[in-house]
Amino acid sequence: MSTSAHLPADPAVATPSAARTADTVTDRLVEANRQYAADFRDPGMDARPVLHVAVVACMDARLDLHSALGLELGDCHTIRNAGGVVTEDVIRSLTISQRALGTRSVILVHHTGCGLETLTEDFRHELEAEVGQRPPWAVESFRDVDQDVRQSMQRVRTSPFLPHTDDVRGFVFDVSTGLLREVDPVK
Protein backbone atom coordinates (compact mmCIF):
# COMPACT_ATOMS: atom_id res chain seq x y z
CA MET A 1 0.00 0.00 0.00
CA SER A 2 1.36 3.40 -0.91
CA THR A 3 0.45 6.44 1.13
CA SER A 4 1.05 8.89 -1.71
CA ALA A 5 -2.48 8.54 -3.05
CA HIS A 6 -4.03 9.08 0.35
CA LEU A 7 -2.32 12.29 1.35
CA PRO A 8 -2.74 15.93 0.38
CA ALA A 9 -0.55 17.08 -2.50
CA ASP A 10 -0.21 20.54 -0.95
CA PRO A 11 2.90 20.53 1.32
CA ALA A 12 1.40 23.26 3.48
CA VAL A 13 -1.48 20.94 4.35
CA ALA A 14 0.72 17.87 4.89
CA THR A 15 3.28 19.52 7.18
CA PRO A 16 2.56 21.65 10.22
CA SER A 17 5.89 23.45 10.07
CA ALA A 18 5.82 26.71 8.12
CA ALA A 19 9.60 26.42 7.78
CA ARG A 20 9.31 23.39 5.49
CA THR A 21 9.15 24.13 1.82
CA ALA A 22 8.99 20.60 0.39
CA ASP A 23 6.75 17.65 1.10
CA THR A 24 9.14 14.83 1.95
CA VAL A 25 8.37 11.13 2.10
CA THR A 26 8.72 11.33 5.87
CA ASP A 27 6.22 14.20 5.98
CA ARG A 28 3.74 12.10 4.01
CA LEU A 29 4.24 9.12 6.31
CA VAL A 30 3.78 11.26 9.42
CA GLU A 31 0.57 12.64 7.95
CA ALA A 32 -0.60 9.11 7.15
CA ASN A 33 0.02 8.27 10.80
CA ARG A 34 -2.09 11.21 11.92
CA GLN A 35 -4.94 9.93 9.77
CA TYR A 36 -4.45 6.38 11.08
CA ALA A 37 -4.36 7.56 14.70
CA ALA A 38 -7.60 9.52 14.28
CA ASP A 39 -9.52 6.22 14.05
CA PHE A 40 -7.12 4.07 16.09
CA ARG A 41 -8.49 2.05 18.98
CA ASP A 42 -6.18 0.16 21.30
CA PRO A 43 -6.68 -3.50 20.38
CA GLY A 44 -5.83 -4.54 23.94
CA MET A 45 -3.02 -6.88 22.91
CA ASP A 46 0.27 -7.43 24.58
CA ALA A 47 3.62 -8.03 22.85
CA ARG A 48 3.27 -11.83 22.84
CA PRO A 49 2.33 -13.07 19.36
CA VAL A 50 -0.95 -14.98 19.31
CA LEU A 51 0.47 -17.69 17.01
CA HIS A 52 3.76 -18.00 18.96
CA VAL A 53 5.74 -17.57 15.75
CA ALA A 54 8.58 -15.32 14.64
CA VAL A 55 9.05 -14.59 10.94
CA VAL A 56 12.50 -13.60 9.68
CA ALA A 57 12.37 -12.11 6.21
CA CYS A 58 14.10 -9.86 3.74
CA MET A 59 13.38 -6.14 3.92
CA ASP A 60 12.49 -6.10 0.19
CA ALA A 61 9.55 -3.76 -0.36
CA ARG A 62 7.81 -6.32 -2.59
CA LEU A 63 7.16 -8.67 0.34
CA ASP A 64 3.87 -8.01 2.10
CA LEU A 65 4.38 -10.70 4.71
CA HIS A 66 1.13 -10.31 6.57
CA SER A 67 -0.92 -10.68 3.40
CA ALA A 68 1.26 -13.41 1.91
CA LEU A 69 1.07 -15.52 5.08
CA GLY A 70 -2.51 -14.67 6.05
CA LEU A 71 -1.40 -12.95 9.25
CA GLU A 72 -3.27 -10.38 11.30
CA LEU A 73 -1.96 -7.76 13.69
CA GLY A 74 -0.68 -9.50 16.79
CA ASP A 75 -0.14 -12.91 15.18
CA CYS A 76 3.67 -12.89 14.92
CA HIS A 77 6.93 -11.15 15.53
CA THR A 78 8.46 -9.92 12.28
CA ILE A 79 12.22 -9.47 11.99
CA ARG A 80 13.49 -8.05 8.70
CA ASN A 81 16.89 -7.24 7.27
CA ALA A 82 18.69 -7.22 3.94
CA GLY A 83 18.40 -10.75 2.59
CA GLY A 84 16.46 -12.09 5.56
CA VAL A 85 19.69 -13.70 6.71
CA VAL A 86 20.15 -14.90 10.25
CA THR A 87 22.76 -12.56 11.71
CA GLU A 88 23.86 -11.98 15.29
CA ASP A 89 21.18 -9.32 15.68
CA VAL A 90 18.49 -11.67 14.34
CA ILE A 91 19.57 -14.26 16.92
CA ARG A 92 19.31 -11.50 19.56
CA SER A 93 15.75 -10.68 18.47
CA LEU A 94 14.74 -14.35 18.23
CA THR A 95 16.16 -15.01 21.70
CA ILE A 96 14.07 -12.21 23.17
CA SER A 97 11.07 -13.37 21.15
CA GLN A 98 11.35 -16.92 22.46
CA ARG A 99 12.62 -16.47 25.99
CA ALA A 100 10.69 -13.35 27.00
CA LEU A 101 7.67 -13.36 24.71
CA GLY A 102 6.74 -16.99 24.17
CA THR A 103 7.37 -17.77 20.51
CA ARG A 104 8.16 -21.37 19.65
CA SER A 105 8.25 -21.49 15.83
CA VAL A 106 10.54 -19.71 13.37
CA ILE A 107 9.74 -19.15 9.70
CA LEU A 108 12.47 -17.86 7.39
CA VAL A 109 11.44 -16.13 4.17
CA HIS A 110 13.93 -15.30 1.43
CA HIS A 111 12.78 -14.41 -2.09
CA THR A 112 13.57 -14.59 -5.77
CA GLY A 113 15.47 -11.69 -7.30
CA CYS A 114 17.09 -10.61 -4.03
CA GLY A 115 19.53 -7.71 -4.22
CA LEU A 116 22.05 -9.63 -2.10
CA GLU A 117 22.52 -11.99 -5.04
CA THR A 118 24.14 -9.11 -6.94
CA LEU A 119 26.46 -7.87 -4.18
CA THR A 120 29.75 -9.26 -2.92
CA GLU A 121 31.87 -8.60 0.13
CA ASP A 122 33.64 -6.03 -2.08
CA PHE A 123 30.77 -3.75 -1.06
CA ARG A 124 32.40 -3.48 2.40
CA HIS A 125 35.77 -2.66 0.86
CA GLU A 126 34.20 0.03 -1.31
CA LEU A 127 32.54 1.53 1.78
CA GLU A 128 35.84 1.47 3.62
CA ALA A 129 37.55 3.29 0.75
CA GLU A 130 34.76 5.86 0.63
CA VAL A 131 34.31 6.63 4.33
CA GLY A 132 37.66 5.60 5.78
CA GLN A 133 36.26 2.92 8.06
CA ARG A 134 35.40 -0.73 7.37
CA PRO A 135 31.89 -1.72 8.42
CA PRO A 136 31.94 -4.22 11.31
CA TRP A 137 29.24 -6.32 9.63
CA ALA A 138 29.36 -8.80 6.76
CA VAL A 139 27.31 -8.14 3.64
CA GLU A 140 26.03 -11.76 3.75
CA SER A 141 25.66 -11.85 -0.01
CA PHE A 142 24.84 -15.14 -1.70
CA ARG A 143 24.46 -16.73 -5.13
CA ASP A 144 22.12 -19.62 -4.26
CA VAL A 145 18.96 -18.54 -2.41
CA ASP A 146 18.10 -22.10 -1.35
CA GLN A 147 21.54 -22.64 0.14
CA ASP A 148 21.29 -19.33 1.98
CA VAL A 149 17.93 -20.38 3.46
CA ARG A 150 19.58 -23.65 4.59
CA GLN A 151 22.42 -21.70 6.19
CA SER A 152 19.94 -19.46 8.01
CA MET A 153 17.95 -22.48 9.25
CA GLN A 154 21.18 -24.04 10.50
CA ARG A 155 22.17 -20.84 12.33
CA VAL A 156 18.81 -20.82 14.14
CA ARG A 157 18.90 -24.54 14.93
CA THR A 158 22.41 -24.43 16.37
CA SER A 159 22.15 -21.25 18.43
CA PRO A 160 22.70 -22.03 22.11
CA PHE A 161 20.47 -19.08 23.03
CA LEU A 162 17.31 -20.40 21.37
CA PRO A 163 15.43 -23.03 23.39
CA HIS A 164 12.87 -23.80 20.64
CA THR A 165 14.57 -25.00 17.45
CA ASP A 166 12.44 -28.00 16.51
CA ASP A 167 10.00 -25.98 14.37
CA VAL A 168 12.27 -23.95 12.08
CA ARG A 169 11.26 -23.88 8.42
CA GLY A 170 12.59 -21.93 5.47
CA PHE A 171 10.93 -20.70 2.30
CA VAL A 172 11.60 -18.79 -0.89
CA PHE A 173 8.89 -16.30 -1.87
CA ASP A 174 8.48 -15.92 -5.62
CA VAL A 175 8.05 -12.19 -6.29
CA SER A 176 6.38 -12.94 -9.64
CA THR A 177 3.72 -15.40 -8.44
CA GLY A 178 3.39 -14.67 -4.72
CA LEU A 179 3.89 -18.34 -3.88
CA LEU A 180 6.13 -19.75 -1.18
CA ARG A 181 8.35 -22.72 -1.93
CA GLU A 182 9.66 -24.65 1.04
CA VAL A 183 13.39 -25.34 1.12
CA ASP A 184 14.55 -28.79 2.15
CA PRO A 185 16.92 -28.22 5.09
CA VAL A 186 19.18 -31.07 4.02
CA LYS A 187 20.50 -31.25 0.49
Image: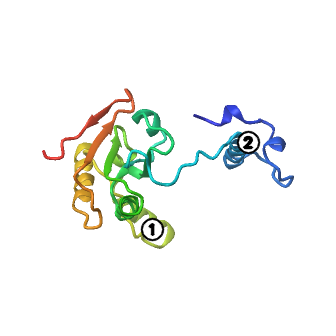
Image coords of residue 8 (percent x, y): 77, 36
- Identify the image quadrant of residue 101: bottom left
How many marks overall? 2
Percent position (x, y) of residue 166? 22, 52
Q: Position of residue 129 (x, y in %)?
A: 45, 68
- Which residue corresponds to mark 2? 38
Specify the farthest residue to the left: 187
Name the image quarter holding residue 163.
bottom left
Residue 54 x/y as whole percent: 38, 50
- Residue found 24% across the figure and 43% down from its top: 146
Q: At x 73% / y 45%, what residue is drawn? A: 34
Could you classify mark 2 by the number of other residues whose Cα lies within 10 Å: few (under 14), some (14-19), or many (20 or more)? few
Residue 171, relative to residue 45: is it above or below? above
Dot placed on the residue nearer the N-terminal end, 2 or 1: 2
Q: Which mark is residue 129?
A: 1
> Looking at the figure, which quarter contains the C terminus?
top left
Element type at mark 1: helix
Q: Amino acid at mark 1?
A: Ala
Extreme top residue here?
Answer: 177
Residue 166 is left or right of residue 108, and the answer is left
Query: In this picture, is 133 found above or below 6?
Result: below
- Comparing 45 with 28, the one in front is 45
The kind of residue tagged 2 is: Ala
